[in-house]
């Protein structure tokens, strides 16, 4: 999995799989899902992240497992 913060585009992107993206859909305002040929989600993009999180929150990543 790859995580990318693009401050210029004001976006946060989670790439879950390296399969080819064949379709993208904005499922909620500012949330875009990328799908492969089997309709599986391979990426999630959050737009306008500066309105969703502070710079400090975006500079630190926390992982939680159950």
Image: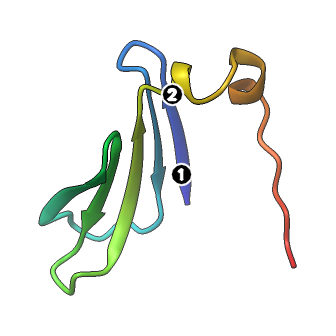
Where is residue 48 shown, x and y percent of the image? 42, 25
Which picture quadrant has residue 37? bottom left
Find residue 43 and report its horizontal and vertical position in percent.
Answer: 38, 59
Nearest to the observer: residue 44 or residue 3: 44
Residue 17 placement, left or right of 19:
right
Q: Which residue is at 87% across, 79% downward?
A: 66
> What is the quadrant of the N terminus in the image?
bottom right
- Tell me the residue that label 1 is attached to: 2
Q: Which mark is residue 15?
A: none
Residue placed furthest toward the bottom: 38
Q: Is residue 11 left or right of residue 32?
A: right
Q: CA distance from mark 2 to mark 1?
A: 17 Å
Q: Secondary structure at mark 1?
A: strand
Q: Which residue is mark 2?
A: 49
**Colour setup of the view:** rainbow
Q: Is residue 57 above or below residue 45?
A: above
Residue 39, percent across and down? 22, 82
Left or right: residue 63 versus residue 22 is right
Task: Using residue 23 as the reference point, say whether residue 5 is left or right of it.
Answer: right
Question: Which one is earlier in the sequence, the residue at label 2 or at label 1?
Answer: 1
Compared to 39, does 33 lie above or below? above
Which mark is nearer the camera, 2 or 1? Answer: 2
Contact between marks 2 and 1 (CB within 8 A): the answer is no
42 is higher (above) or lower (below) than 10? below
- The crowding category of the residue bearing disc 1, from other C-alpha atoms within 10 Å (few below 14, some 14 to 19, many at least 20), is few
| Quarter where residue 34 is shown | bottom left
């Amino acid at each position: 999995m790859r995580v990318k913060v693009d401050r210029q585009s004001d976006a946060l992107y989670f790439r879950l799989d390296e399969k080819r993206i064949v379709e993208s859909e904005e499922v909620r305002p500012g949330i875009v899902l990328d799908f492969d040929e089997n309709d599986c989600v391979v990426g999630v993009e959050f737009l306008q992240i500066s309105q969703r999180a502070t710079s400090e929150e975006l500079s630190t990543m926390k992982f939680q497992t159950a």
